[in-house]
Amino acid sequence: MRIKQEEEEESRRKTRRSRPARKPKVVKETKPVEEIVDSLDLKGVACPFNYVQAKVRLETMDIGQLLEVTIDDGEPIENVPKSLTNDGHEIVDTKKVGKHYRLTVRKGE
């Protein structure tokens, strides 16, 4: 009888070991991907004309929509984001691409 109990115990141990551990499911909360509605290439356009063109384009868009603006390094990257922010728009992202910058702007009210 003792041998039978030992065999059963050994069988249970093997069964426990042979099962792979369950990995917990990871549920990631993802934000909806926002789509850029329009883009504006202002490389080589001097201040304040680059800001004015971005402002005019934003006026044609709905509140909350995204505009991608490409501007030069130097004075434009210093002034255009500040001016757009002062107008109530949000700079969502700024990326340096070569000698230029790509701004993602969300239209404000």
Image (tube, grey):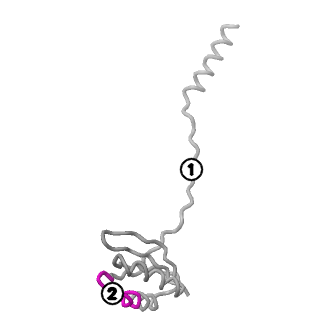
Secondary structure mostly taken by the magenta-highlighted segment of the chain? loop
Helix, strand, or loop for circle 1?
loop
Q: Which residue has dot 1 on it? A: 26
Q: Mark 2 belongs to which amino acid?
A: Ala
Report which quarter residue 14 is drawn in: top right
Q: Is residue 88 above or below residue 6?
A: below
Q: Give residue 53's mark.
A: none
Q: Which residue has dot 2 on it? A: 46
Q: Mark 1 belongs to which amino acid?
A: Val
The quadrant of the rendering that contains the C terminus is bottom right
Q: How many marks?
A: 2
The quadrant of the rendering that contains the N terminus is top right
Residue 10 in the image: state x and y as whole percent: 62, 16
The stretch drawn in magenta includes residue 44: yes
Q: Is residue 61 left or right of residue 70?
A: right
Q: Residue at x 66, y 7 (%)?
A: 3
Residue 29 in the image: state x and y as whole percent: 57, 60
What segment is highlighted magenta in the picture?
42-52
Q: Residue at x 57, y 48 (%)?
A: 25
Helix, strand, or loop for circle 2?
loop
Q: Foreground mark, 1 or 2? A: 2
Q: Is residue 91 above or below residue 52?
A: above
